Amino acid sequence: MDEHEPVLVDETVAALAVEAGGYYVDATFGRGGHTARILSALGGAGRVLALDQDVEAIEAGRTRFRGELRLTLVHAPFSQLRALVPAHAQGQPCRGVLFDLGVSSPQLDQPARGFSFRSDGPLDMRMDTTRGEPVAAWLARAGVDEIREVIATLGEERFARRVAQAIEAARRERPIARTGELAAIVARAVRTREPGKHPATRTFQALRMHINDELGELERGLAAAVDVLAPGGRLAVISFHSIEDRAVKQFMKRAATLDPELASLPVVPATAAPRLRLVGKKQRASAAERERNPRSRSALLRVAERLP
Ligand SMILES: C[S@@+](CC[C@H](N)C(=O)[O-])C[C@H]1O[C@@H](n2cnc3c(N)ncnc32)[C@H](O)[C@@H]1O
């Protein structure tokens, strides 16, 4: 129940080019699978700052890594990296930042967290339960067009209008408070079934991304990571679906390209210069890993290096 099998671990440690005395950031600690491997590649002088916006992840980490003095665990969203890294780095250059996006298995598996359409629980889906509003509260107050827009864009759901109308009709009867209720409402509205997928998969993904502002966090987190990385430092990002991967790919491409508006100037200003160099091609899990860990089947790793 409290386990999370990390994906692409060897590939990630290689991508970060972990050096024994280096300072690294795991922006999405989860249950610490990647952090553990980075720590084991470090010597006594190496250090890791690990963040998670889920209090339960940080508490589990404090237990798992009790006595590990090279690790600092902080409950914070990764959009705060720009302030947190200088405060913790003690002058050490940051050699790598890892993002392993999305939710962890313990979050999905605990019905009480409200992420799952498979087991009934309160309709919450917040990663950080200390702030923000649960999905149930948002669904009670949002306009039907707003709901349709979120489900269409963040879930890429063809039947977004029907789903939004079904939610509107159901909430007129009584508030939608449970994941099971929402899953049943969506299942009645979405006619065609994609093979192997629950009809509510896309709606749940969209609502989760919206309530946690996942794309906003990602954009701010990546920008902050580029700012805190030392020249030669590595940025490694694992994503799990096409919307996330597109955002990562476009961010890296932009940061690796000379600003076209300024490129034609006789003297190109330093601020227009590319800040990243793309490293290798996107990577997927090996056949053996995909067989062993179904979560890894959709995982994509992209890597870039900070330029001076
Ligand atoms: C896929 S899991 C990471 C698993 C981890 N690599 C491991 O090996 O156990 C993603 C984690 O990132 C956290 N997370 C997602 N978005 C975040 C954000 N914006 N800031 C901080 N943590 C975030 C989630 O709470 C979750 O615990």
Image (cartoon, helix red, strand yellow):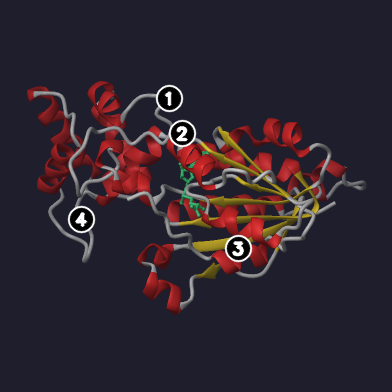
Vertical relation: 224 (above or below) 232: above
74 sits to left or right of 128: right
Q: Which mark is residue 130?
A: 1
Residue in the picture at 62% in, 32% down: 80
Mark 4 or 3, nearer chain start: 3
Choose top left, top right, bottom left or bottom right for residue 5.
bottom left
Q: Position of residue 125 (x, y in %)?
A: 33, 36
- Identified by mark 4, the residue type is His
In the depicted view, which residue is nearer to us: 250 or 136? 136
- Residue visible at 83% across and 50% down in the picture: 264
Number of residues whose C-alpha sits closer than 10 Å to that of mark 3, classed few (under 14), some (14–19) or many (20 or more): many
Check disc 1 and give the amino acid type. Answer: Thr
For the view shown, which residue lies furthest in the bottom direction?
Answer: 287
Name the N-terminal-most of marks 3 and 2: 3
| Mark 4, other Cα within 10 Å: few <14 / some 14–19 / many ≥20 | some
Measured Cα–Cα span from mark 3 to mark 2: 25 Å
Residue 158, relative to residue 269: is it above or below? below
Comparing labels 3 and 2, the label whose residue is closer to the camera: 2
| Residue contact between numbered discs 1 and 2, judged by CB atoms under 8 Å | yes
Where disc 2 sits, the SS reads helix
In front: label 4 or label 2: 2
Residue holding disc 2: 55
Instruction: Name the residue: 32% across, 38% down.
Output: 207
Q: Position of residue 297 (x, y in %)?
A: 40, 67
Q: Which residue is mark 3?
A: 12
Q: Nearer the viewer, mark 1 or mark 2?
A: 2
Judged left or right of residue 11, residue 207 is left
- Quick one: label 1 or label 2, which is nearer the N terminus? 2
